[in-house]
Amino acid sequence: MTTIVHDTTEAVCLSSEYNLYLKPIAKMTISVALPQLKLPGKSISNWEVMERVKAMVAPEQFSALRISKSTMDFIRFEGEVENKTVVKSLLSRLDGKSIKLSGFTDVLKVRAVENKVDFPTRHDWDSFFRDAKDMNETVPGERPDTIHLEGLPCRWFSQKDSQFPDRPSEEVLIAVFQTFGKVRNVDIPMLDPYREEMLDKNFNTFSFGGHLNFEAYVQYQEYCGFTKAMDTLRSMKLMLKGDDGKAVACNIKVAFDTSKHLSELALKRRSMERLKLQELERQREEQKRREKEEEERRKEEERYDQLQKRNRELQEEEEKERRKEERTRKREQKLREREERRNLKRVRRQQEEEQKKLQMKIAMEERRLLLAQRNLESIRLIAELLARAKREKQEQSRQKEELARLQQLEACRRKQEEELRRVEVEKERALELQRREKELRERLLCNLLKKGSSKASRPQCKEEQTGPGEEASDPCGNDVMLGFVMYVYGM
């Protein structure tokens, strides 16, 4: 049974190539004495007692805690923790303490001791092989050199990228246990297909936990390798550490071999038995093959007889069917001939009716064609009339456009003539103004000249004629002002 390992600090590397480690087993036995039940029908809950035990060791926790025995006088628990260093601390918290349950006046006494693992010592195997009558310590397999392992997980000892991940490998087993010394020989009984039929059938392939496990025998060349392996595996469980850092562990059973499993005599005996079983299996296969061939031949003869019988029955049935078909064919032939005569008459009548219908259809089509021709001629005539009307309309619109263009040209010409006349009138007016300006200048010059001469010849005469305080009249000055006004206003 595998369990998850959270703390791997105490793990010792067994094989770095296959991520296998050895972890110390830290187990303890806890006994809780139960009081005498005085009232009938009253009982003590094992689960409640277990929870109280767990609470007594807090904040530490058991990695596993189960009831190993329960009686009317006591309850015995078997607990396991992650590290062996924690065991003493838990024992000090549990041993000699008491538990008070609700509803009971008496207290429950707790006793806790470290669990001793049942593992063979050097004295055990030395005394066994020394006292054994049928053992020879000079022969491999009959001396302390072979370890018997049980409960090894198959997946942990399989080849990497193997097609059978649930099948262990002897090469992996050798590579793992060669850490303690050179391995002479190994044996995995579950890999031998003939082992179940041999005499030594005492090997297991499955543990009660439901996982596929196997047993194995590892034989070392030297005694020091055997002792080193046994001392290292004592009170240890096997642990696998994954690439993601997660680890699982399982308990394995380790013992020294007392059955001479890997001795030369046992190997030869199993080899001979294997050859006998192979020969027996070959004979069985040959017998099965002959029986199968005989069975197939017998079945083939039965099939042939059945086939012949079936063929005769089929021939008889075919002959009956042929006669029946012949009668049916003749009867059908008569019916067909009668039906053909009827059909011929029916076809003739249909042809006559179709001929009449065709003639009527032709006459109707000829009349439709005549009407269509007349309609076509009417359409052509109407089209011609419409075309002529259109041409006349186009001619009238063209004449209107031409008339409008001529009127526009005439209006333009008149406008130009009016502009020319206006220019000529302006020109004549300008010439007239120039002429008047010239005359006015001449008159103005003449008046100025006259005025100057009159002022020089008759200044005195004017003074005599005009009295004091009177102004003399100047006819020349009036004329000058008049001419200037006429010039300004364009007269």
Image: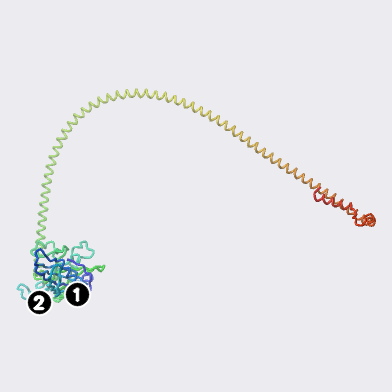
Q: Is residue 221 visible?
A: no
Q: Answer few, some or many: residues within 10 Å of disc 1's Cα (few below 14, many 20 plus, some between 14 and 19).
A: few
Q: Is residue 142 visible?
A: yes
* Mark 2 lies on residue: 123
Q: CA distance from mark 2 to mark 1?
A: 30 Å
In what element is the residue under mark 2?
Answer: helix
Give whichever of 106, 252 is nearer the camera.
106
Depth check, mark 2 against mark 1: the one in front is 1
In what element is the residue under mark 1?
Answer: helix
Marks 2 & 1, CB-CB < 8 Å contact = no
Q: Is residue 26 above or below residue 197?
A: below
Give, as a three-letter code, the residue at label 2.
Answer: His
Q: Is residue 54 above or below residue 393?
A: below
Q: Is residue 389 left or right of residue 209?
A: right
Q: Earlier in the sequence, mark 2 or mark 1?
A: 1
Give, as a three-letter code, the residue at label 1.
Answer: Val
* Mark 1 lies on residue: 86
